Structures are given as C-alpha cells and as structure tokens.
Image (cartoon, grey):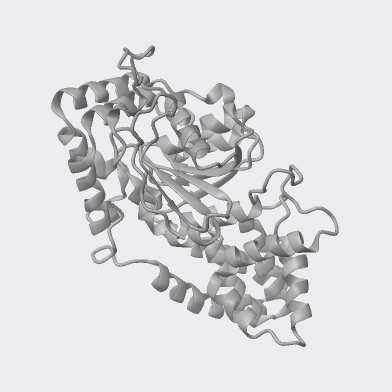
Amino acid sequence: MTQPPTAAQPDTADAPRLVHHQVDGPADAPVLVLGPSLGTALSLWEPQLPDLARQYRVVRWDLPGHGGTPTDVLEPRDGAAPEVPTTAVADLARLVLDLADSLGAERFAYAGVSLGGAVGAWLAAHHPDRIDSLALVCSSARFGEPAAWRDRAALVREQGLGPVAAATAARWFTPAFADSAPARDLVKALRDTVDPAGYAACCDALAGYDLRADLDRITAPTLVVAGREDPATPPAHARELTDHIPGATLVELPRASHLASAERPAPVLAALLGHLAEHPARPAGHDPDGRAAAGDDRSRHAAGMTVRRAVLGDAHVDRSIARTSALTAVFQDFITRYAWGEIWTRPGLSRRTRSCITLTALVARGHHDELSMHLRAALRNGLTPQEIQEVLLQSAIYCGVPAANTAFALADRIVDEYLAEHTPDPDTAETDS
C-alpha cells in the first residue's frame, strides 16, 4: 500500500513541524527510514523502492530546503531567534525522530546516503533504543575539514547554487556515468529545486559533524557501503566506520562514485536487502538479538521466507511455491524453516560469505541446477563477477578442474544474463530525480 507524499505540517501550539516525506509499503510491515544526500530529494531512492516496499513500510524524507521540506522547518514556531545560529546533524536527527513518532514507529531500520547516513549514525549512537539496524551508504564519521563546508555555505548564500551545481557531477558520479540521463536529471534537480538557504544550512551541519569518538557507541547491526571511485567519501572513510563500529560489515562497489545508490542501484539494493534480512526488525517483546525463540516454528518460517526472497528473488520463490504439491509441501516448509530461517539468518557470517561457501559446496558436489540458482543469488547478495571468478578458481584447486570447468560455463551464461537484466541503458533509464 502506498501513501501519498506528506509535506511539512502547519504550525500548531504543540506539534513539531514535520519534514516532507512519503510512505510506501504495507502499513503493518517493519519501518525502514531512508535518508537523502545533500542536494537530493525523495527520488534518490526511487530505484530501490519497489523491492524494499514489498517487505517494509518505507519512509523517505527530504532535508530542509530540499524537495518539499521548507528551509525554516527547524526555526522556532514563535519566530524567536534560534539558540544555535547554524543547523547541526543533531537537529536533522530530531526531525527524523519527530517524523517516526508521528507515524507511530517506536523502532525502525535506517539507511542513508552521505549526510542522510550521518543522521542515521548520530541516531544510532545517541538513541540506540530507536534503531533496529543501520546502513551507511557513501557516508563518513567526518566529512573533511569544517572550513571547506563553511566556505561552500558562504558561496551558496552569496551566489546561489550555480557554482556548486557546475562541479557536482564530477563529485557525484564516475566519468562513465556523469553524462547519463539519470545523472543529468539529478544535477538539474539540484540546480532548479533546492533552496540555497537550505543547502547552506546543511553545509553548516556537515561542518560541525564529527562522530569519530562516538562510533563505538553504535550497537545496531551496521552495513557500510562504499563506492571505490568516490572522491567525496573515499573508501578510507568507509573503512574507518567499519573499523570502529562494533561488528560492522563493509561492501565496496567498483565503478561507483558518491551517489552509488543512483549509479549502481542493483548492488546497493542487494547489499541492503541482505543486511535487512540478516538483521530483521522485530516488534517490541521479541528477543533482543532478533532471532526467533527456540521451538517457535512460525517465527522461523517467517524469518526464513524473508531471507529466502531476499537471496533468491521473489520470482524464483513464487515459482517454487506455485509448484508445491501435497507431497513436497513438508519439504518446502522444512527448508524455509531450517536452511533459511536457522542457517542463513545466523549473524556470524555475512550474506556474501555464505554465498561463497555455498557456491564452493555446490561445485564440489556437482549440483548444477542448485549452482545456477545460487550464482544468481550470489549476484543479488552483492558479489561481483570478478569475485565469483575467484571463488570458482579456488574451487578448481580443491574440488577438481572438471567440476570447475562446468561451473565456469554456467557462471559465464548466468552472469551475462543477470547483468543484461539489471544494467539499465544510461541514455534511456528512468530518471532518479
């Protein structure tokens, strides 16, 4: 179920102003809040929305001065001068909490790009009781020297967004993607729809942001996604996050710059779905580590079905369910509860690692139908063709060259098919903004 966009609410004596937002997905599903990057709006997450909204109540929101959120959303309602003259990430985080409260979301999963990720990290460090899981896409614990952000804020206040927009494509995208239709439209939206005052206020927030000393306070399961060609938040920033957030997982994407969610939408979606399935949100009253209680077959089956769909895809699972007969129903229930609900949901290994292990085992045993299925699953879990190549080379040594020869032939066909299905033509792709 999709709900229409909601703008910031008019002032009342008691209610806080709300940022412009849109809610998609089932009303009774776990809540997933998606945060934007500086200079972007709701549509940044459009490529991932259909898949995410099947399983989650997805809430996207706009920064002050971006999309439908007015720049003055943080100003006191009585017109008094703000106590702090510039916006801070903590102020943006308060807007997100106000939004979650208005939707009745006591706890929620959070994923954000760049500044949107910083908001999520701040919430996870300072309000751990609200965050079920966290995903930081091309983000950082500190976005460079504060003076550079203050200079950019001053430039925008004086000259508007023209000078910034002119250099944005080189920061946001790789050269191969920068002249694509989606990239051009995102830059045009920055130039035409973002309020310079709101943009400058967000620059102030980035200037004052430094969460390095608080990263170890983050207890939510955390995924960090980096673009290997990102000049704004290079992979070193992602590694710093991963090294200091307990138990964090790092995924580095080749051929991706700062707006990886727009440039490499399929790998970002695969990483996010895997992370969310591995660390499912639970209603209040469930066990704290998110695993079903022993003997709770219904909970295991539900968790298993979520992971099974995330790894194998809805189309495959729907076909399997449609073919279920009275004879095979008990086996379908068994593998959903045991293989997917018990093993694939365990927190000890990442989805990517489990895919590597599974591919090797299937090569060794010669289970070619299952191998074909799990090659596709590995790509959905974020493995690159190059990483699959390395797994099969390793398998050639320990499982035998004939087995690996067949596996390479299967992989060559399946990788080509998958990439053809999931790589849009940059000149005809639907706009992300």
Q: Which residue is rendered at x = 46% and y = 72% of the image?
A: 418
Q: Is residue 375 above or below residue 79?
A: below
In the image, taking residue 259 as reference, residue 335 lies left or right, namely right
Q: Is residue 256 visible?
A: no
Q: Is residue 79 visible?
A: yes
**Nearer to me, 238 or 67:** 67
In the image, taking residue 396 as reference, residue 62 lies left or right, namely left
Q: Is residue 358 above or below residue 346?
A: below
Q: Which residue is rendered at x = 37% and y = 22% of the image?
A: 87
Q: Which residue is rendered at x = 56% and y = 42% of the image?
A: 105
**Nearer to me, 60 or 27:** 27
In the image, taking residue 291 as reference, residue 8 lies left or right, namely left
Q: How many marks?
A: 0
Query: Residue 262 location, x and y as percent?
Result: 36, 53
Query: Residue 121 location, x and y as percent?
Result: 52, 33
View extreme (front): residue? 13
Query: Residue 59 location, x and y as percent?
Result: 46, 47
View extreme (right): residue? 295
**Nearer to me, 328 or 156:** 328
Query: Residue 269 location, x and y as percent?
Result: 48, 57
